[in-house]
Amino acid sequence: MIRHFTTLSLLALVASCTTNTAQTPKLAYDSSRNPDMLAPDLYPSGAVAEKEPVVRYGRYTLVSTLPDSGQRDLMAQIIDISIPANMHPNVRDAMQYVVDRSGYTLCSPETGHVNILYTRPLPAAQYKLGPMTLRNTLQVLAGPAWQVKVDEVNRQVCYVLRPGYQLPDSPQLAKTQVALTNTLSTPASAVANTSNNTVVVAAVPSAAPITGTSTVVANLGNVPPPKPVSTPAAPAKDGSIARPAVRPVSVPASVGSSTSASNNAAATKPASTVQTAPKPLAQTWSATTGSTLRQTVEAWAATANWKLIWKADDLDYPIDAPLRFEGSFEEAIKQIFPLYDGAPRSFVVDGSSSPIQRVIYIAERKQ
């Protein structure tokens, strides 16, 4: 039995050895095939944003690495400012105050009709702005008539008029241009009376300077001598006419002496050496485009040393064309305010001039 089992084992071993064939070794890289794609593929549908990780600060603090909304969208910045009341700001001043350090700039006042919005006085309700986003702050300052236009390439903010709103009439534009061309050739009194409504400036005009005794002497020297006073001639009894009696007219000694002195001085002094007092140069008062009437008059008053009292704070008009006047401060005031008599709200100008104080008073004309 044992011999039979051993024989079967040997036969099985020989059969297994004869069926196994030697395998040829495989090459490490086959140049006839394309390189295999890396598996598994991490981007089967392209790059997909995943949840941003958090960073641990300290033992119990986790901080997100996501940028906040104000960094992704600059118009979503939070604005919380208070504009100083002593600035007397207009809308452009407030907008400049808001966009400061925000990354944006305002467009130029010459862009379209945006200067109409820029020169409006800032309402008292908007001196405190925020906390709100920059997007909402710029729209609140503009109001419902103007739409915010943002140029993200240049990061510039501008405003356009919304559909359905109409630009205000500007009747004084043509008048100011005519006044500008006629200022140098038309006297101040003629310019001041071009309007039907008369603006009264109760200011005492400056008197011509007195250069001394020579001016008085010259004026008295041009006065013709007084004619002698004679009584009517009456016929005598014999028919002859007697000569009328001539009564000399007394002349004050000062006048006579000054007249004779001036005549003697003129006779002894050559004509070439007689000098007249130089005429004082006329002052120039200008108003630039982009400013307002109140800003212009305030600057003029400060230059002329006058105190300005502007009663109607909400009454002001933009300067649509450059203006230039010559003369004194009172003459410039008489020429500029009549240009706005045709406006919906006109002015009443009053003032007083004294050696102690010079005041000009601006109020709204009651319709």
Image (cartoon, rainbow, N blue to C red):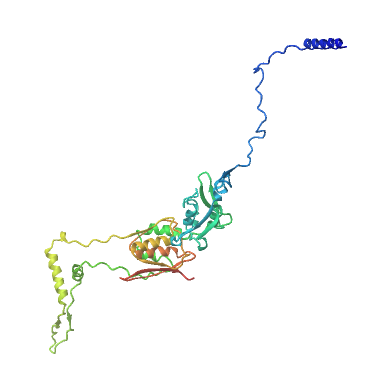
Q: Quadrant of the N terminus?
A: top right
* Res 65 → quadrant: top right
Q: Is residue 352 left or right of residue 346?
A: left
Q: Is residue 87 placed above or below 200 in the rendered structure?
A: above
Residue at image coords 28%, 60%: 281
* Res 286 → quadrant: bottom left
Q: Residue furthest right?
A: 1
Q: Is residue 233 placed above or below 316 in the rendered structure?
A: below
Q: Choose between 216 and 69: the one closer to the eye.
A: 69
Residue at image coords 15%, 68%: 262
Q: Does the rendering let one see residue 124?
A: yes
Q: Does the rendering let one see residue 323?
A: no
Q: Is residue 254 placed above or below 296 in the rendered structure?
A: below
Q: Choose between 245 and 284: the one closer to the eye.
A: 284
Q: Choose between 243 and 91: the one closer to the eye.
A: 91
Tell me where residue 103 appears, x and y as whole percent. 49, 48
Tell me where residue 296 appears, x and y as whole percent. 40, 60
Tell me where residue 129 appears, x and y as whole percent. 52, 58
Tell me where residue 260 appears, x and y as whole percent. 13, 71
Residue at image coords 36%, 63%: 301
Q: Is residue 87 left or right of residue 225?
A: right
Q: Choose between 293 and 83: the one closer to the eye.
A: 83
The number of callouts visible is 0
Q: Residue furthest left?
A: 268
Q: Residue furthest front?
A: 2
